[in-house]
Image (cartoon, coloured by chain):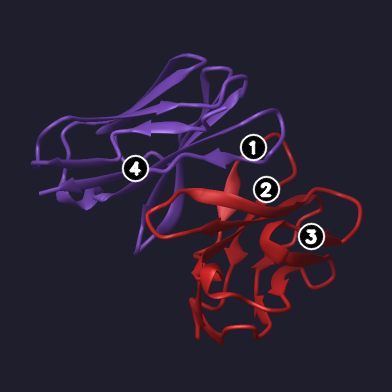
Amino acid sequence: DAGVIQSPRHEVTEMGQEVTLRCKPISGHDYLFWYRQTMMRGLELLIYFNNNVPIDDSGMPEDRFSAKMPNASFSTLKIQPSEPRDSAVYFCASSLLGPEAFFGQGTRLTVV
Amino acid sequence: AQSVTQLDSQVPVFEEAPVELRCNYSSSVSVYLFWYVQYPNQGLQLLLKYLSGSTLVKGINGFEAEFNKSQTSFHLRKPSVHISDTAEYFCAVLYGGATNKLIFGTGTLLAVQP
């Protein structure tokens, strides 16, 4: 398996624009997680899904952030409108039943 | 509140020296414990995990960790480090219960010097 695949790897956008980050989990995994990593706050869990259903979105910072998982092989994290303070590395991770999570290589988002 | 503490933000060490990276978690009846490593511009990779059984856990790249319930600790150790071990190391805890939510520490940068 190719592992968790995220796209794009890098995204530079202007403040106010919509940004969509994409994730393909490992085939067969039933949990999917979105994390954000910044120098100030470290790794934060934003939201996670189980069998495509959002279970806990308490980490989503604002209504500008939304996440979807339309099927078992695809998820998106959308920020609309984006702000400079959203600049971070966003990681997607997936796991099968148990707690061990496999991470993608991340999307580095820069909002100018 | 559930939390994970990595007191050392950075640990400098010379090549071939031993190293210990500290991790403490807030007490709970049931925990699963993990160490992840992050190389520059990469995602996180699992080093080792403790789910149950033996409290001494061996992982990849010669690392090991010991679960100490009385001290609520899960320190990571390696007897002899290499330059290639330079990376950020994250301790993570999954607290027992219905949630599948990993809580990460703030990370420790292991800087191996020649």
Q: Earlier in the sequence, mark 2 or mark 1?
A: 2
Please tell me if label 4 and label 1 are on a single chain.
no
Residue B70 placement, left or right of B85:
right
Q: Residue at x 74, y 62 (%)?
A: B27
Q: What residue did someone put label 2 on?
A: B94
Q: Residue at x 64, y 83 (%)?
A: B16
Cβ–Cβ under 8 Å for marks 2 and 1: yes
Give SS at disc 4: loop
Give SS at disc 3: strand
Cβ–Cβ under 8 Å for marks 1 and 3: no
Please tell me if label 2 and label 3 are on a single chain.
yes
- Which tag is nearer the camera, tag 1 or tag 3? 3
Q: Residues within 10 Å of mark 1 (few under 14, many from 20)?
A: many
With respect to residue A8, does B19 lie above or below?
Answer: below
Q: Residues within 10 Å of mark 3 (few under 14, many from 20)?
A: some
With respect to residue B93, does B74 lie above or below?
Answer: below
Identified by mark 4, the residue type is: Pro
Please tell me the numbered disc located at residue A61: 4
Picture colour for chain A = purple
